[in-house]
Amino acid sequence: MSDPMAEIKASFFLECEELLEQLQDGLKRFEEGDDDTETINEVFRAVHSIKGGAGAFGLTALVSFAHIFETSMDIVRSGEKTPTSDDYKTFLHASDILCDLVVASRDETEVSKARVDESVVTLQAFLGERNKSEQEVDPLDFQPMGVSMDLSPIGNLGNISPSTRVSSAPSLLDLTSFPDAAADDNLDKVSPSSQNEGRHPHIPRRPFSQGRCKDHG
Amino acid sequence: MNLRILAVDDSRTMRDMLNLALNHAGFTTHLANDGEHGLEVLEHMEKPDAIITDINMPRLDGFGFIGAVRIQEKYRGIPILILTTESADTLKTRARNAGATGWIVKPFDPPKLVRALQLVTG
């Protein structure tokens, strides 16, 4: 019987190939003067989607790097900074690292820490002041957490304990987590974190193993 | 409780995971890959019990999608949950102002997502 989560994970890595291509193509077009806002939005979304999927499968190294890369792209798309030619080199190199981390995550190998850290340092330099505030936020702090829910907008929800309002959004329910629901063992089986993260031999390795991760460095 | 859920996310992986988790709970899911597609799917499906949407999507993002849903009288009472990796208060304020009901940060825990949907749908 097939493992649906294993299949989704395999599909995630295939999706990553498409996203990485979108990312690198977008960065090159942006560097060449394409000032269409949708171009940088595509780049941002590519990194953002890789981060989101990686988080779902607990791929922490990939999540961490994708987070700082994503933040850099957010600065560019928001217009906070206009990248220099050196910045584009930084981003292209970061896209290579991201690719390597995707491959490593898929193959359960590792990327040289020194190589990753080198790219992180250059991205942090680009982030500048924003990097200081980002460091106060754990990029992995988007795991399901304890309940934080404002009950007042929709009234009594039974035995859910009330908590403080979501600051600045008093009528928005923060539903990131709940107290444990009534036991349903079957539901836990679809949790990504509960799945064995074994190899997936049916994943075609061709694109990444044949030099898909370019060296822009 | 068999809920009918519309889930909107540009990530194929996320759509697959939502589909798996929600179907496993006995819910019926309709999927869309961005806000504009979400509006198309919504128009052609039986009224959902709840909607889940990402924020960062091409063509029409989550805020635009929610706003477009809320201006339609028949959909004003539907709970809309945002499912995203982001958690900034400024975004939550935008979400509230657009008409979102709740916010869940990715990665989601399937049983807790199911529980959240059961609660917001009463």
Image: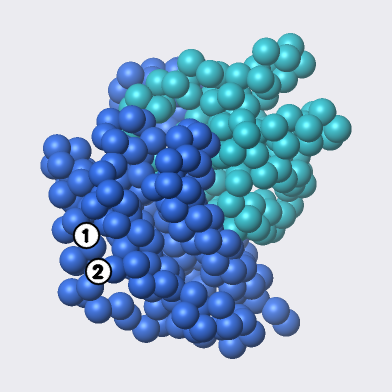
Chain colours: A blue, B cyan
Q: Can residue A125 be seen from the camera position used here?
A: yes
Side of A96 where A43 appears, left or right: right
- Residue A108 occupies quadrant: bottom left
> Residue A198 in the image: x percent, y percent?
50, 83
- Mark 1 — on which chain does it sit? A
Q: What distance separates the C-alpha of mark 1 from that of mark 2?
A: 6 Å
At label 2, counting other C-alpha atoms closer than 10 Å, the crowd grade (few under 14, some 14-19, many 20 or more) is: some
Side of B92 where A198 appears, left or right: right
The answer to whether residue A166 is above or below residue A34 is above
Q: Name the residue rendered at 44%, 21% in the picture.
A: B94
- Mark 2 — on which chain does it sit? A
> Residue B88 in the image: x percent, y percent?
33, 32
In the image, A85 versus B86, the foreground residue is A85
Secondary structure at badge 1 equals helix
Q: Can residue B8 be seen from the camera position used here?
A: no
Q: Name the residue rendered at 30%, 45% in the picture.
A: A72
Secondary structure at badge 2 equals helix
Mark 2: which amino acid?
A: Val
Side of A136 where B91 appears, left or right: right
Return the residue at label 1.
A120
The answer to whether residue B102 is above or below residue A136 is above
Return the residue at label 2.
A116
Q: In the displayed image of the protein, which residue is found farthest to the front?
A: A32
Q: Circles 1 and 2: CB distance less than 8 Å?
A: yes
Look at the image and tell me in which quarter the N terminus of chain B lies. Answer: top right
Q: Name the residue rendered at 59%, 38% in the picture.
A: B58
> Residue B40 in the image: x percent, y percent?
78, 32
Mark 1: which amino acid?
A: Val
The answer to whether residue A28 is above or below residue A35 is below
